[in-house]
Image: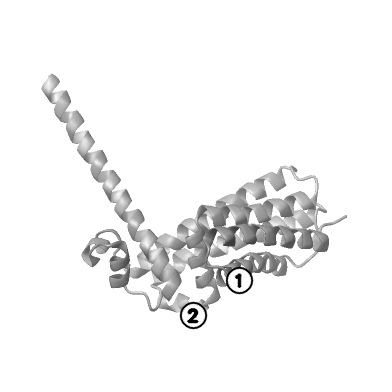
Amino acid sequence: MHKGRRMHRHQQAIRERKSREKDQRIQGILAAAKKVFFSKGYVRTTMDEIAFEAQISKPTIYQYFKTKDELYSSLMLPFLEEFGSRFERIEKKLKNGKYATGRDLVKDIFRLFIRCYEHAPDSMRVANTFFQHQDLISQLSQEARSAISGKGKYDFQIARGVIETAIAQGLIKDIDSYALSDIIWGIFLGLTQVMDMKSTKQGSTDKYLKSTLRLAERLLVDAIVQE
């Protein structure tokens, strides 16, 4: 009986070790893919280059990701899901009447962008590249296009809904919700890109990005918040 329990624990330990190794390998592939996609773009990136960056064989990558599309989607979708999840929390807070002023709401929206960037800066950069080059969509498979576009549209609808609810509650001025959503999104993506171009030092980039976003937040508050 004791021998059976020892055997069970041994087998469980082996399974757990294999699971950890698999997770580590997947994370290594994703980290390599982020780096190559960001530096070369989707179209010019090859699976051979990702394999070289990850220091594994190309067949090993295909054990976990069947196509380049699937790998790219695996980088994009977690970011979009994180973004949507954080905006849903703001939406819930807004609908429950938790915002006393529009200033507080705008502050939370900008904090959302900063948190998403801190959570996955490379994924944010990949997303930035994707949204800047809409012709990239045609290069993806139908399945990948549907997954990314569907999630992106949902996130945008949530963001626009937050703006419309804030207008209805008198927290911000009566402004075109579509245009304002684009402006807020454009502020963040644009500043992210500018900061990356101006500095190769990650720490200084992050620090300057945050201070610049805080200035953008104050300017937007002055422009749209209902006094």
| Residue drawn at the location 61% of the way across and 62% of the way down | 156
Instruction: Return the residue nearer the eye: 35 or 92.
Output: 35
Mark number, residue 114: none
* Residue type at the position of mark 2: Asp
Instruction: Return the residue nearer the eye: 169 or 1.
Output: 1
* Residue type at the position of mark 1: Val
Q: Earlier in the sequence, mark 2 or mark 1?
A: 2
Q: Residues within 10 Å of mark 2 (few under 14, many from 20)?
A: few
**Residue lying farthest to the top in this orientation:** 1
| Residue drawn at the location 64% of the way across and 61% of the way down | 208
Task: Residue 3: give x, y in percent of width and height.
Answer: 11, 23
Task: Residue 56: give x, y in percent of width and height.
Answer: 25, 62
Q: Is residue 178 left or right of residue 227?
A: left
**Quarter location, residue 140:** bottom left
Task: Residue 44: give x, y in percent of width and height.
Answer: 38, 78
Task: Residue 40: give x, y in percent of width and height.
Answer: 42, 75
Q: Is residue 190 visible?
A: yes
Q: Secondary structure at mark 2?
A: helix
In the rendered image, which residue does mark 1 sit on?
Answer: 194
Kindly report which numbered mark, 2 or 1, lies closer to the viewer in this rendering: 1
**Quarter location, residue 60:** bottom left
Q: Is residue 149 visible?
A: no
In the rendered image, which residue does mark 2 sit on?
Answer: 135
How many numbered tags mark residues here? 2
Instruction: Say which quadrant the C terminus sits in.
Output: bottom right
| Residue drawn at the location 78% of the way across and 62% of the way down | 219
**Residue lying farthest to the right in this orientation:** 227
Q: Secondary structure at mark 1?
A: helix
